[in-house]
């Protein structure tokens, strides 16, 4: 197997490092043939057992096709299959060398666990890692080379080369990059919103002037038919990166119109990871050598580890915020050993595309400078590649607009400093607006995004230092916010003895009650990290708040029972802290079965209430009988029931009010479900001399007295 010069040098370094440290990583850009280093290692050690790991099967098939030979000493396995291996199957592998291809993918939670388990099982195995970039940009910029290939404090990277360096050295061809600005209206709206909301009143005019100039220039942009007719060639092979299956259908229906000036009968194929039947279309695309233009619509495939021969270029229809994915898609058009200039046609990235490709050009300049500084001038083949702008001066106008908007930074900083002086920190709520109407919370958030590489713009070291001086928190802001809320919860628990925080409770403008409820919800859904759950439990967190509050109210009901000897509690009765205990007891009767609106009581809860005199069935009858007994006792002692409305029995029962309700129930039967006047009750009240109204009393006595003497 003959390696290119750059790969031969990397291979020799990797072999030496494997012998010394048993670990070696090769970080070369897509298209440079780094998989051939691993094949060379396999070929040079025919008696060793190799385990080759990769994100998916089609990468293996493509690599074996490129190698044009079979290797009996290699077992290919996906990271997913590795994760699912039983302990017996894992121990049966017995690899002497492990090759984690695209090893940056080992940072994924599940796949990472599988790899960790494998390396623990075979600590003496050699490990050769291959990747275009070890950085996981959307995962807090984790460097997987440092995590997987650090041995005794030494970073074992045998060879590292950036995409830009590969282009400068002529290892990969310099592409022609074409920007289209087709979705500029979205970008213009974003900039307009920025000017309207983020720029102080006195600074709006320069930014608006630049935006208007850019808007006029973009309005002259061509449509896709003209763009494709200008840049694509009949007979060429192009990969179109799409967002999803619906996007594919939309693009496929437009292809006859878009490409009619290039080819009246374009050959269209599709490759989609979620649809196995499209594999046949991919094979047909590879085999198609006709004179027609060949278009492969691709979803979640060919992003990494795959090199399609004879590709004339790529068309980026899929927006992405991942620098890894962006460079991988571009890399499909760049292959070592080809002399043709590939086309990269950026349809959707628009202004982002200008920034990303501008970054690659800056990296190329840095790579050329480093080569000169190390005396390797002879390796430099090209120092820039051509960018074709559909809109003349589009990049210049964007840069001018960005410059005009960034000139207001000092004014924002002054507002941030004032906030720091007043509050002692820079933890500005996102919706915070200054007295002058500036959305300071949004600005602070944007500075963090720029600093982490996920936002637009630049932060010079001087600006970072200035923000540091006023307490800027650059790290994981959600973690910081959670810890701050946890401290408030700890203070509440220390002061109140529990974490049964009312939902409406706010402390210092923070919704602590809602935050506590949210933590319970996340734990119930399995989304609260275990370490956070443990911290909350240590300060008294109760996950089932219903059961906890039930116990508290049960203790209040028990105290009432111990004082009064029953749970015959008036509905309006409140405990010392204002809790309506009477209503709660009534609710427990309903919640004994699922007919109630609350959570159905457990058998333990039912037993505990029964033990303190709870009457479950016919409770209104029991209460009525208890009140009647008091009325009967009054009648026995006084010979009448001529009781004032406000009269209370010696034990505090409002007998006068109860008697008035009985008379009212006779007049309006069924209106009050708690006081229904049945025939039996009427007769019993008659027996103890109830006079139903004044007119009746006058008729019977003539002097307002009872008819019972």
Image: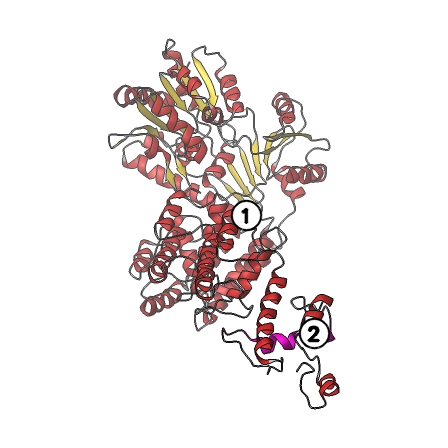
Q: Residue furthest bottom?
A: 703
Q: Position of residue 657 (x, y in %)?
A: 60, 77
Quarter of the rendering occupied by the C terminus: bottom right
Figure colour scheme: secondary structure
Which residue is painted at 43% across and 39% down in the image?
A: 384
Q: Quadrant of residue 446?
A: bottom left
Residue 466 shown left or right of residue 623 in the figure: left
Q: In this orientation, does residue 4 appear?
A: no
Residue 350, labelled with which disc? 1
Instruction: Judge by depth and name the residue closer to the eye, 91 or 149.
Output: 91
Q: Magenta segment, which residues?
A: 651-669
Tell me which label, 1 or 2, sits earlier in the chain. Answer: 1
Q: In this orientation, does residue 378 appear?
A: yes
Residue 665 lies in magenta, yes or no?
yes
Report the residue marked by disc 2: 686
Vertically, is 583 above or below 607?
below
Residue 360 lies in magenta, yes or no?
no
Instruction: Judge by depth and name the residue closer to the eye, 428 or 526.
Output: 526
Q: Quadrant of residue 501?
A: bottom left
Q: Magenta stretch: dominant SS?
A: helix
Q: Position of residue 502 (x, y in %)?
A: 46, 62
Instruction: Judge by depth and name the residue closer to the eye, 240 or 646.
Output: 646
């Amino acid at each position: 197997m003959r390696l290119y010069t750059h790969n031969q040098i990397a291979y020799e370094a990797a072999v030496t490092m494997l012998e010394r440290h048993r670990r070696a990583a090769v970080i070369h850009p897509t298209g440079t043939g780094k998989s051939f280093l691993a094949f060379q290692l396999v070929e040079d050690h025919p008696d060793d057992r190799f385990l080759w790991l990769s994100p998916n099967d089609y990468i293996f098939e493509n690599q074996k096709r490129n190698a044009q030979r079979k290797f009996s000493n290699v077992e290919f396995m996906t990271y997913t299959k590795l994760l699912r291996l039983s302990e017996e199957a894992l121990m049966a592998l017995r690899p002497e060398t492990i090759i984690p291809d695209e090893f940056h993918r080992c940072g994924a939670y599940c796949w990472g666990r599988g790899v960790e388990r494998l390396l623990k099982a075979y600590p003496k195995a050699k490990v050769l890692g291959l990747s275009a970039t070890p950085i996981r940009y959307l995962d807090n910029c984790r460097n997987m080379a440092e995590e997987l290939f650090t041995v005794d404090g030494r970073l074992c990277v045998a060879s590292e080369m950036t995409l830009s360096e590969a282009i400068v050295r002529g290892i990969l061809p310099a592409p022609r990059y074409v920007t289209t600005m087709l979705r500029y209206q979205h970008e213009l709206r974003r900039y307009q919103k920025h000017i309207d909301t983020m720029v102080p009143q006195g600074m709006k005019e320069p930014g608006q002037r630049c935006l208007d100039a850019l808007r006029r220039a973009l309005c002259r942009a061509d449509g896709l038919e003209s763009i494709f007719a200008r840049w694509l060639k009949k007979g060429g092979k192009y990969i179109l990166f799409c967002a999803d299956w619906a996007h594919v259908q939309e693009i496929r229906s437009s292809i006859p119109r878009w490409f009619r000036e290039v080819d009246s009968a374009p050959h269209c194929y599709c490759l989609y990871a979620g649809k196995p039947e499209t594999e046949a279309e991919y094979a047909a695309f590879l085999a198609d050598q006709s004179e027609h233009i060949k278009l492969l619509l691709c979803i979640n495939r060919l992003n990494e580890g795959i090199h399609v021969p004879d590709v004339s270029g790529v068309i980026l229809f899929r927006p992405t915020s991942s620098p890894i994915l962006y460079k991988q898609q571009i890399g499909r058009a760049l292959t070592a050993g080809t002399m043709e200039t590939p086309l990269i046609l950026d349809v959707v990235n628009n202004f982002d595309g200008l920034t990303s490709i501008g970054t690659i050009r800056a990296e190329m300049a840095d790579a050329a400078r480093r080569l000169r500084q190390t005396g390797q001038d002879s390796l430099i083949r090209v120092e820039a590649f051509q960018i074709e702008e559909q809109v003349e001066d589009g990049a210049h106008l964007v840069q001018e607009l960005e410059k005009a908007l960034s000139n207001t930074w000092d004014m924002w900083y002054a507002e941030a400093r004032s906030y720091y002086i007043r509050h002692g920190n820079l933890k500005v709520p996102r919706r915070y607006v200054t007295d002058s109407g500036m959305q300071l919370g949004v600005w602070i958030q944007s500075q963090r995004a720029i600093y982490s590489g996920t936002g637009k713009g630049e932060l010079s070291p001087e600006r970072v230092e200035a923000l540091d001086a006023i307490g800027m928190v650059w790290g994981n802001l959600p973690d910081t916010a959670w810890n701050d809320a946890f401290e408030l919860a700890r203070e509440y628990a220390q002061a109140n003895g529990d974490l049964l925080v009312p939902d409406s409770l706010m402390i210092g403008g923070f919704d602590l009650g809602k935050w506590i409820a949210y933590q319970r919800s996340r734990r119930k859904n399995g989304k609260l990290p275990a370490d956070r759950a443990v911290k909350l439990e240590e300060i008294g967190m109760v996950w089932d708040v219903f059961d906890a509050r039930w116990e508290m109210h049960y203790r209040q009901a028990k105290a009432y029972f111990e004082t009064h000897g029953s749970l015959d509690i008036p509905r309006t009765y409140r405990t010392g802290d204002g809790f309506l205990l009477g209503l709660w007891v009534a609710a427990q009767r309903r919640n004994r079965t699922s007919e109630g609106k609350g959570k159905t009581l457990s058998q333990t809860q039912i037993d505990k209430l029964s033990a303190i005199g709870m009457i479950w069935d016919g409770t209104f009858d029991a209460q009525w009988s208890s009140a009647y007994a008091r009325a009967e006792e009054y009648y026995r002692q006084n010979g009448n029931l001529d009781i004032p409305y406000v009269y209370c029995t010696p034990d505090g029962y409002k007998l006068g009010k109860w008697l008035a309700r009985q008379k009212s129930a006779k007049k309006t039967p069924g209106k009050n479900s708690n006081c229904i006047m049945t025939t039996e009750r009427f007769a019993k009240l008659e027996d103890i001399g109830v006079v139903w109204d004044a007119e009746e009393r006058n008729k019977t006595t003539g002097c307002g007295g009872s008819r019972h003497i």
